[in-house]
Image (tube, rainbow, N blue to C red):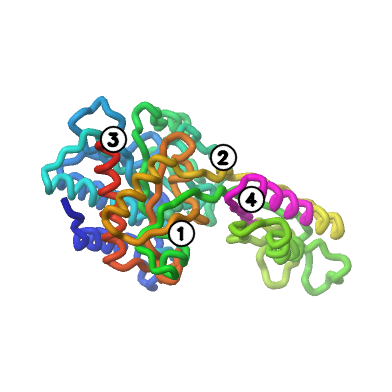
Amino acid sequence: MVIDVEKVMFYLEELYQCGKQPDGTFSRIAYSKEDQEGRRLFAGWFAEMGISTRVDEAGNLIARMEGRNPALPAILLGSHLDTVPDGGRYDGAAGCVGGLAVCEAMKKAGYIPDHPIEVIVFTDEEGARFGSGLFGSSAICGQPLEVSEEEADGCGNRQKEVMEKSYGIRMEDVWKAKKEPKDVKCFLELHVEQGARLDREEKAIGVVSSIAGVVRFEVEIFGEANHAGSTAMGDRKDALVAAAELIGEIPEIVKKTGKEFTVATVGTIQVSPNSVNVIPGNCRFHLEIRDQEREIMEAVEKNAFAYLEEVCRKSGLEFRVQKISDHDPQPMQDWLRKQIEEATKEMDYSYTILPSGAFHDSLAMAQAFPTGMIFVPSKGGISHSRYERTEKEEMKKGCEVLLHTVLKVDNM
Ligand code: HGY
Ligand code: MN
Ligand code: MN
Ligand code: MN
């Protein structure tokens, strides 16, 4: 039973075309027409194999290949197809196509697994459009995310309306997407490392030990819009200057409070009225903090907002903070990690055991099910970028370890 890597690269290329923009960037933002097109393609490839797909109440696209014994819990594979703006073509797609390739290899070899296998394309993993992320996987593990009425994207599209229009998601029904632990053997996600370790150490496979937790906030600073020409510097309540003071201080706060894997990022910022000759009266931005330890995340959060408190007190401004998503760091399941390691050794592939700084659908799934992750190298550690690359040979090894691990788990 072999992985057809030519097909794998074909699928990845076809998916890349669903999101490749005329200016050379690549974006398949959740709920967009590109996202819908990518899912249509993906479902069509399963249909060609005679495997049916369905969309659950959280918009997750789920393909199910029956096993010999339908009473057995399912082995779940998959990842996400949505991307960040100007993102990479393998982030998420590798895990979805990997799951498809495993089913295709079994079908071709006439091998029927004991356990049913499901390949899931999770809804909105990145949160690139509305800020939270892990929407579909949170629902499947029984922790559906709240979506507030006023949540809108940069173009004023309301999140709830976009979700219902694109994937028929009705918030009052999302809880029905929950999978019961008795119905799930494990969840296995193949993913690009999105870091430089495998590439630097020239290792073929990453066996993930844990995934960093992530907490995301929307911060809004209230100042006073005024004339940029006639308002003296001492009379200003400039919301952007206050935001800039905190943003500039973040690296120092992380250095003082954090450890080896602590990161904090302000990746978005909106200023209003956003005019060259008006002092910014309002500023909104997202702050996210990640670490392998919850206590460290909380310490960075406390210091960051204490600093902002002081900045606003000094300049007579107000601010509000809204937590928009919060996921604990998660260790990967021991017995499953050992199966991945065994499979990798049996295939004589070089590997290293490492934590993941990026989060994945596995971060949500690990809260409810035995979860494991397999990494393949990202050239130069680049990801969330159009320059994200993984070689064909490396992708082949990742899919083979995924297939081999599934076969081992199926026979446990
Ligand atoms: O942001 C992340 O870590 C992931 O790629 N969604
Ligand atoms: Mn990803
Ligand atoms: Mn990503
Ligand atoms: Mn992810």
Q: Nearer the viewer, mark 2 or mark 3?
A: 3
**Of residues 28 and 11, which is closer to you in this image?**
11
Q: Residue at x 26, y 41 (%)?
A: 63
Residue neighbourhood size for the residue with mark 1, other residues' Cα within 10 Å, grouped as few (<14), some (14–19), many (≥20): some
Residue 244 lies, in percent from the top left, at: 72, 65
**Measured Cα–Cα span from mark 4 to mark 1:** 18 Å
Please name the residue that numbered disc 1 is placed on. Answer: 84
Image disc number at residue 381? none
Please name the residue that numbered disc 2 is placed on. Answer: 149
Image disc number at residue 218? 4
The numbered mark, 4 or 2, whose residue comes first in the sequence reads 2
Residue 360 lies, in percent from the top left, at: 45, 50
Disc 1 marks which amino acid? Val
The numbered mark, 3 or 4, whose residue comes first in the sequence reads 4
Examine the structure image and report whether residue 293 is included in the region drawn in magenta: yes
Q: Secondary structure at mark 3?
A: loop
Write down the quadrant of residue 27 in the picture: bottom left
Prevailing secondary structure of the magenta residues: helix
**Measured Cα–Cα span from mark 1 to mark 2:** 23 Å
Q: Is mark 2 within 8 Å of ligand 1?
A: no
Residue 120 shows in the view: yes
Cβ atoms under marks 1 and 2 closer than 8 Å: no
Q: Residue at x 50, y 34 (%)?
A: 143
